[in-house]
Image (cartoon, rainbow, N blue to C red):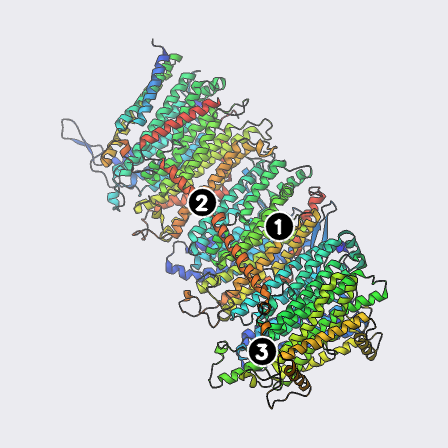
Amino acid sequence: MQLVGFPVIAGIVLLAFVANTNKTAHEKLNNPIRMASFAFSLGLFTYTTMMFFEVFSDISSAGLSFNTYQFHDSYEWFPALGIHWTVGLDALSFPMVWLTTFLLPVTIIATWHEKNGATYFPTILLMGGALIGVFVSLDLFMFYVFWELTLIPMFFLILNWGGKDRKYASQKFFIYTFTASVVMLLGLVTLYLMQPDQIGSGGKYGTITGRTFDIPTLVDHATAANQNGWFLGESMQKVLFVMLMLGFLVKLPAVPFHTWLPDAHVQAPTGGSMLLAGVMLKMGAYGMFRLPLSMFPHALQHFQLALMIFGMVSLVWGAIVCLGQTNLKKMVAYSSVSHMGVILIGIATMQPMGWAAALFMMFAHGIISPMLFAVCGAFKHHYHSMEIGSMRGMAKHSPWLATSMMFAWMASLGLPLLAGFVAELMMLIALWYFIALEGWSVLWMVGPALVLALTAAYYLWSMQRTIFEGGDETQPPASLHGGPIPDLSREEKIAMLILAAFTILFGVMPWIGLDMMDDYCRTFFEHMISNGIFKGGA
Amino acid sequence: METTQAFTPEFYTAVMPEMLLFFGLLALMIIPNLGKGTFRIRGTQIRLPWFLGGQRYAWSSNPHLPAWIATLTLTGAFVAVADSLRGGVDAVHIVSSDAESAKELLMINGFSRVFELIFFGALALASFSSMNRLRVEGVGGKLKVDQLYNNRRQADFYILMLTCGLGMSVVALAQDLFVLFIGLELASFSTYVLVAFLKETKAGSEAGMKYFIVGSVASGVGLYGLSMLYLWAGSLQFDVLAATFAVSGTEPLPLIGIGFVLVGFGFKVSAAPFHFAAPDAYAGASSPVAGVLATASKAMGMVGLIRMLLIVAAPDASDGSAVWLVCLGALAALTMTWGNIAALGSTNPKRMLAYSSVAHAGYMLAGLTAVGAWTWDPTFAGNESDAALMVLTAVLFHLLVLVAFKLGAFLVLSILESDGDASRLSSLGGLAKREPLLAFAMFIFMISLAGVPPMAGFLSKLMVIMGIVNVGVGTGAGGLGDFHWVWWLALLMVLNSAVSVFYYLRVAVVMFFDEPEEGREGPLPKGWQVRTSILVCVLATVLIGVFGNSLLEMCRTAAESLTTKW
Amino acid sequence: MEGTELKETMYVASDMFQFAPLIILLPMMAFAVILFLGRVFNGNPTWKNAVKEGGMIALGVMSAVLIISVLLIMDFIGGAGAGHESVLHWFTSGVWDGTSAGVTTEKFGFGLYVDHLTVMLLFVASFLCLLINVFSIGYMNTDPINDNRNHRFYAEFTLFCSGMLGMVLADSFLWLFIFWEIMGLCSYLLIGFYYERPSAAYAAKKAFLTTRIGDVFLMIGLVMLWDLFGSLDYVVVFDTANIEHVAEQSAGTLQWALGLMFIGAVGKSAQFPLHVWLPDAMEGPTPVSALIHAATMVNAGLYLVARMFPFFGAEALHGDLADLAYIIAVIGGITAVMAAAIAFVQIDLKKVLAYSTMSQLAYIFTGLGCAMYLANTLDWHHNDADHYIVIVAFGAALFHLFNHAMAKGMLFMASGSVIHEMHHAHHHLHHHDDHGDDHDDHHDDDFDAQSMENMGGLASKMPLTATAMLVGSASIMGLPLIGGFWSKEGIIANAWRVVQDDPRFLFPAMCVLIGAGMTGFYMSRMWLKTFAGKPKTEVAAHVGPTNTWIKTPLFILIFVSLSSVFFAGMGFTHWAPDEHYALMGEKSLFEGILYEMEHAFANSDMYFFVLTYIAIALGAVAGPGLAMALYGGQLEEGETAKPWMTPVIRLNAWVKGRFNFDNTAFAESTLAVALQNRLYIDQYYDMAMMKIVAGFSSKAAEVDTKVIDGTIKTIETSSQSLSGAVRSLTTGSARDYILMVAVGMLVIFMLVWGVA
Amino acid sequence: MIDPALVSGLSALMFVIGLGGAFTRKNAIIVLMCIELMLNAANMQFAAAAIYHGDTTGWVYTIFAIAIAASEVAIGLAIFLAMYGQHDTISLDDVNVLKN
């Protein structure tokens, strides 16, 4: 509750300061507002980190079984509709919340000198608040509200601080994801109304509608119903599964629903990209775990093949398209598509390990991709160009930037002992285990294998054309107009170092985060198996 | 429940808000005309001052005076209605006489009160904000305050506002179709003139003409439908009509009659294909008037539709659904899609809002369609009437909150209008630089119209969708194939919402991204009244979206009071 | 599967075990420290001259590592024996086998594992790392081009050492792979050390990508292996009971898994068809070539295959893995001949060595393949004679690995010494008149300090270097009694032994036999072109002696290479592969040497006796003879070589005078051109990469924007035009509006009528 | 007494003529007249129904409707005047500044 409320309120209050002020006053306010935002985000980070040490660091002592939550709290909101402001954290949502609070200060540092800071930093805070809201909400309605609420600050981040085509990109981003999520909303509403009418029973149930939006209650119902057949009936469950997944797949995004992402990323400012790739995409995967996977396990099993195909296509297509990009940021954006494919495949394996891989991939990608985009942002900022090859021999001219880039690239291509590797490895193991177990074709391994090579290819190729070569012979890009060749600013360096440090930390010591995710997935499966919902040979 | 005759003391207590309006009207006619006028006694030179006409006093010629009177009157009425709504309304029936055969004329209950809330609220905001925004001269010129206000025409404007409100409240209260029609005509005539109020411009007079002609045709058709119903039933009392309909509802005469009446109301709610005059009227009228058309006037049409469809031609429990189900469903689908598609390419913000208002009419019609289908599933799990009440609640709620963000959007445009022009999208350009708070308000209105949480527009749209889905899923055991087709209206509705984001967002982009038009970089005209109104709208939009529970419950109570049959 | 019954700890026999993690951690920390200090102190004279820009830090660390390693090895030899210790719980995860039994928890941990194989490679790695560190200080810090970036070199160098040592010590295939990748990264970084050269950038990318392709297969192989055993820990996968269990059910899958892992080894050890990166990798500084691309990292592939030995040797899998063993041998055979052939025509000193490396690694692969085949097909667990055969075959391959690592490290360092001095001389000669910043145009002139066409007659000018080169070459060639002779003979003999069992092996056996002659030719050619004859350029004539930093490791390695015979005598070939044999366990050193001598030169088995002499004739007589006839010659008048080199040069001059012939016809033949173009394989790969992969991907990018995103855009534009169409119905004429009202009325009428 | 059905039929005819005229004629005044025709059709129907049902309310309705029609004409003519002042025409087709 406080986690969401504070950044939103702080954002609004800080924005209120700058409302209707003229330009000079605006500039005077930049620094205090930046400091306030930063201090605030740092406080949030401290708070969630303390949460980690208090509860989530030792997941077994937290004793979370399926569908139980820590910091569980509920407030009446729209009793007429059975809407309660229910919050809670479990091993699924906590890493995402922590990630968000971690990225907020880092983003602020990395974009310390963003123009119009007086409005920029509060917007970032608002963004963070909305994101946290998505993750902590245990109420379908609130979940959806925050889900859409994230669009607004991001829309402004792109529109006000974005690149040349930001007008087009911001609208496309908004409309595309909104379209998918209204379909999801219809699914949610249908799900909501498929509950038996319990009007008059009060409590969690709406006084007008007689239903509840409470996710834990719904999941309990679903579990009970799924034990003896299909919750809501077979075809209904399938339909709802598809409707919900549509919203999540677009957000994730999976091919062929991904084309909003490159546009949004290329045009978004660095801070926007960092949060977009770092947390916002994960909302899709998080939503999958929270809703359809928990409530519609039968449908999940039914659509396993479809999910696997989506995952494979995203994985492979993303990687192939990456190789064909000439725009650095676009390439990184497509690499996100490819990595999100890993998450889908992990889910489609229907293995605790695959799911843990997906969860850890969400987390790891949430640390690595902001760094990727921070690098892209710095590149753009300093060289005024995003074209691969416009700047060569960066290692000589801008060693910090070159090093950061190489580190981020290597982390993203899954170098061992950096955060991404464990997830990829687990995904591969789970996938093969699943293929061998179910007797699927070995050809399913071709996709991941191809992508492991392709990923290396596009990253290395782009490095060859940016970091290496040139040096003495090649002149800096024309866009610099012969000015001095810059390197990272002090703030950017700090941000890069922090991101790199955490990439290494979670690469070398994955158990910090992975233990709780593993616990979540195993509990989930144990729960489903012991209730006879997941049956052998399904 | 109590019954009283007209023009008894109880009657006056019961229709307090209307009486307020009436006296306000009188005051508005008299007070601005007070002056040093004298009356010469015939045949003598003695002039007795009778204070009417002549050179007016400074205070009575204050250009703000009529507006203040109208605003205070409407606000007073609004407060009176709101006060009576607190803690539930006791229904008061007003009958023509104490005889056994007495006709029921008006009924005051929660349902009608909620609509009055909508009418008075919208009119009060509109008159308050048009206090210093009403343009009387040609497009573009910035005039001094003295020039701007031709006091007498100001008075005309607000008189029309009040008659409009009076007519609307009659519509809300009427229990006789003809009484309803009279109220409707009173309100309509006022709006025709209000639309044509900018008669000094080509657009204004043209808009008035179109709105008048098409509206007259529609009400002509409606009146003819009325006459057919009368021919068929021998009375236009709702209860009589309903009873007769239950017996012989499938005869051609009532069906044609209902169809014709539907046309009349369809024009008021601007349902396709009766909406054509609406964009023109909105574009030509001054923005607050357009806002009234899009909110209060639409709500008035909805009252008529609800009375006609849900009371008179109520869905038959044995048969399962209403005769007008398919028809209304088709209208709803056509209306929402047409509105959104047309708005998509519209570059005039007012026309865009007009089309969006068409789309919103479609959403509400879809909701009503669902009510028409509410008893289709014999194995329906919940209380059947709950489903219908939910939709009705949703429609009421939607109409209620629409006042906040639809009117609010028009009010923002009205500021731009007095800055020169608001007929191009580019006139919104750079609003964020010129006046950030105003741009922010407009953004809130836009996303609320689009149905983005946590705005009120989202909640109301969600309610409508929920209502439709609730009816549509039934028990839903067989999956999609087992749904009633109204469920697809919900899908169409969400897809339409998605389409609508496109043009709502474009407004935001223009405000926050584009540069102001040539020569319009300076600050916007002053005027605290309109800004206050906008602030009220913003607060309502956000707060209802976040804390609207009690309002929802109020709408629910109102919906329950519509009829005792459910 | 059996993963739940993980044996946490076998036994920890050595006290040194507790320090073993330091072997990995120290260099890793040095990486960070050097990088950091380098950032801070760059340009500082103390940092530059005393600390050698981090070189001294690295040296200290590597010395410590060597000491710990040696202590560990001594403990091991001294009887502590094999050991395993879990160090780290990495993470756990669950799998569900599709039954209602629930989820099985699987653990992934890290630990250290020490056995004979580990110990051998640990020594090779830590020893060579230290020596090459010393060499680097002499090589890198004296070249102005490296000023202010040597710290990067040393940082990456130490990180590499950490990776190599980690790989050797790791207790599971998973961690083997992890360190393997770290080495790959360092290799990439160090090949691209001169990042400003496009060729270096290209080579670095090529190296990483090519090995990455192998790694992908390796990773999938590992995943399959994990699926079979439920773990990748050596203690689990090598457990006899587990292997039996797997053998019963899925021996075929196991073979596939191992086969895919072998592809990883092929990539890392630059074997055909993933060999293309190694010659280009010579773009890196010479110490890097010496350490990574000759002595250590490329051995990782061999180590991986050698690690698989327990599968091949398992009783339960008897005969099941023979095909894979054959494939290993064949890949080795093909590469051995192909690389040697390409080495014939190379004129770049380092490239010759690169191809030589490839070829020699191929020998070891063939040797391993043969040993694996023997282990898999012979009943060696119960038959002592077969046991001996298997052990010796395996041991020969491992011994060659050892010998080759030492010799090739030395050769590369020697070549580095030559190149360094050539540079220096060239510099001195051409630029000593210019003042100041003549370093910048270092690359501008087209003088190639690595080309053997520019050398000649250096034997007198760089005696130690020439000696090292001579000894190294002899070791590689398999000149009797020197270095690689012992192991190479063993490999050839074992290959031919297998032929007796399985005629399929005739191909690899022929390859290694012919390869022996080819090795003799190209190694001799290299030495002669470089050190014998008259200087071919003015630069070569002005080359001076090299510095002490460079000399020291050369000096040490000469002795190591020469003392190979003692290792052989100690029973290294028995000890290395099998824990049952101790060093000098059965025979004394002297007896051992005698036994080996006899075994080599007077084999009682006629088959092997003849074979040995054919091999010697090819490798030590025919190959060098041919090279002498074509290249080299007498030194410049007045120049004298050291006494031990004089006979070689004299012999060379004599042979050249007596048997010289014109080889232009051959040099211009299609084959020679093809060889010069590396058999066009690189071109084909490049073409495939650029045309097919890059072409396809840019097409795909186009499809993505035009088709997938195009659909979205089409929806948008068409809805806009639809909007226009819809709005054009609002004509502006009130009559039309009335008409529409009438039409709507009619529609309502029909709908209501129709339903009712 | 005329048969109410005949009156009703006449009113239907008038209504159709009125409606048809409304969208076929260009002159605003004629359209207004057509609208009046439609209203009068309703009036006749009310009258006919009043006779048919023997209910006096129908006559009251008629009187009210006539009043409405009268005020409608007043408003209409006023608006047309204003329009003529701006557009110099009362042809409905030529008054189309606002469209799309």
User: Which residue is at the front of the view, C27 or B533?
Assistant: C27
**Crowding near pointer 1: few (<14 within 10 Å), some, many (20+)?**
many
Circle 3 is placed at which residue position?
Answer: C452
Provide the residue designation for mark 2.
C714
Marks 1/3 in contact by CB < 8 Å: the verdict is no
Residue A151 - label: none
The reply to whether residue A424 is in sight is: yes
Q: Residues within 10 Å of mark 2 (few under 14, many from 20)?
A: some
C517 lies above or below B268: below
Q: Amino acid at mark 1?
A: Ile
Of C129 and B86, nearer the camera is: C129
Q: Is residue B28 left or right of residue C154?
A: left
Q: Secondary structure at mark 3?
A: helix
Q: Position of residue C641 (x, y in %)?
A: 64, 87
Q: What amino acid is at disc 3?
A: Met
Q: Are marks 2 and 1 in contact (CB under 8 Å)?
A: no
Which quadrant holds residue B104? Answer: top left
Residue B257 rendering spot, x and y as whole percentages? 41, 21
Chain of the residue on which disc 1 is drawn: A
